[in-house]
Image (cartoon, rainbow, N blue to C red):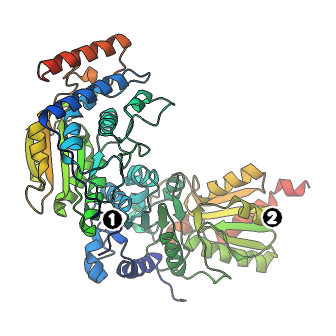
Amino acid sequence: MARPDVREAAEHPLEPTAAGRADLEAVSHRIRHHIVDMCATPEGGHLGGSMSAADILAVLYFSVLRVDPARPHHPDRDIFLLSKGHAAIALYATLAERGFLPVAELGGFGTRRGRLMGHPVTAVPGVELPTGSLGHGLSLGIGFAMAARWAGSRRRTFVLLGDGELQEGSCWEAVMAGAGHGVDNLVAIVDRNGLQLAGETDQVCPAGPPAERWRAFGWEVREVDGHDHAAVSDALARTPWVPGRPSVVIAHTVKGRGLPFLAGKPAGHYVTLSEENRQRAHRILDIGARRGGRA
Amino acid sequence: MNRPVATRTAYRDHLIQLMRTDPRVVCVDTDTGLFAGADFGPAAERYLNLGIAEQNAMGVAAGLAASGWRPYVNTMAAFAASRAVESVKIDIAYNGLPVCVVATHGGVAAGHLGPTHHALEDLAVMRTLPNMTVLVPGDAAATVSLLEQVRHRSGPAYVRLGRKATQPLPRTDGEPVVGELQQMRSGDDVVIVATGPLPTLRSLAAADALHHHEDIHVSVVQAHTLKPFDPAALLHTVLTARLVVTVEEHWRTGGLGSTVAEVLADACGPPLVRLGFPDGFGHTPGTQEQLLDAVGLTAAGIADHIRRALRTDRRRTTV
């Protein structure tokens, strides 16, 4: 079998950083600060779903993914796809914290000064493929995962989906294919914050508990508190949990997590923060951090 | 190769061989029945039948291509170019990935199944996508030749194929070349630009009839490539002609006729008549040939259009 995407991998093994729990709290905190700042740019940003995903992204990039900011295209890297591309600012913030791009570049989000568009674009180091038209990421992930299988690579592929995104039928085409073809080097994570633009996901499009649905399609399912770094890290540390079956983590989260005046509210889905509210948000995040991260 | 062979059969045989000889090649199928895993012998592992799920197939193919593989997505034109087009656009075209979307049952090749299975918009859709190469092989031999050229190009391609066997086109001096127009027949008065097996065959027959009965000299140019399209070559061919006619198995909007119209509009070229399917859905079943007949895409129908257009060629008569 040919290995077209694996070269020199053996000489340059990749390992995740071994961030401790305190470090992860600090990283998440900084990611949230960056998110707030990007939502204070002229066009604003998707604050709610970015804040809900911040802890998951911190865990992925600082304790799970085998990636190297100096070699973003390393042939044996793990693949991460932000299928819920609306949370691009959370990804940019995480990539900046991990060293894929300068933190200062985040200030150019959504402006002609930078390359950071409202949904992930491949011009940004670390972004594998553009996403954000919802319902694409898991199919792409299957492609990456099958490629790794055929190449004999130990690469894993992680896809972060939104629970609202699961209303797209194409997600379920991919869910069926992932289980049907036994793609066990593929891990899905559902950011289950329960909200979408217009309201509660269970009211906009009632579909029942996502864990039961994924299980019914043949995936191995675990449910965790998506803001508990240790729990997320434990769930993602060693996959597959069952050989021959893909894994999905249902991560229960709070939309707008960290900012009580927006948390759990549909109004926090997309915001343009005034300078006053930007500063207020920073103060609140800092107070929350001193109290142990609870919002 | 003088016997009638379907372009999809030629593709099928070609891909089976390709899978065995090119280790980068992957076949992503959508339960079309054209392939079975066993066809690929030792390469069967790289045959993925993903079921009736065209959007997923495009996304999976993009993920594979981004990892260095060369996927061929096997589906029907009606589903590739409408059902799954957002996945083609965002996952494949946006990223310029080398995925070959091979779409069988193009045009009304699935005529008897009705408009759900007709693809009369696919060329319009695909040619608007940046990075996309859009091909309509004229016969089985051209299918193999064009697919082989695509394999050595970067970027995505859409290849529109048929269903049943069609007659091979007359041999020309050279092989079809991606991005070039293929001169099938020469004449000074009128230029027909045709795409697809039956439109090209019928255009050639119309040109013969006009030449023999009325001494009207007609060129027939085959546009097996709609994108990239060569405006300079088209203008070189048509600028001294009295009339240009496009013939395609596609709605009159957005396909070859529109492509040629855009070129002629930029250059103030000769008058243009666009022949294709009118704006509407068919209401009667029939074979591919019968449905083409029903909208006047016959040799006689094409010839009649040319006669009428020449009679009303006001620009010519005022010179």
Residue B136 horizontal/vertical position (percent): 54, 68
Q: What element carries label 1?
A: loop
> Chain ID for label 1?
A
Numbered label attached to residue B12: none
Judge whether residue A48 can be spotted in this image: no
Check disc 2 and report the residue beneath it: B241
User: Along the horizontal axis of the image, is B38 left or right of B92?
Assistant: left
User: Which amino acid, mark 2?
Assistant: Ala
- Residue B130 or A154: which is nearer the viewer? A154
**Which quarter of the figure has residue B100?**
bottom left
- Residue B169 or A279: which is nearer the viewer? A279
Q: Residue furthest top?
A: A276
**Which quarter of the figure has residue A223?**
top left
Crowding at mark 1 (Cα within 10 Å: few <14, some 14-19, many 20+): few
User: Along the horizontal axis of the image, is B174 left or right of A149?
Assistant: right
Q: Which residue lies furthest to the right in this view?
A: B319
Give the tally of numbered discs: 2
User: Along the horizontal axis of the image, is A135 left or right of B291?
Assistant: left
Crowding at mark 2 (Cα within 10 Å: few <14, some 14-19, many 20+): many
Taking the spot 31% from the left edge, 54% from the top edge, the residue there is A140
Q: What element carries label 2?
A: loop
Residue B246 horizontal/vertical position (percent): 66, 62
> Chain ID for label 2?
B
Check disc 1 and report the residue beneath it: A8
Is residue B65 depicted above or below A63 in this figure? below
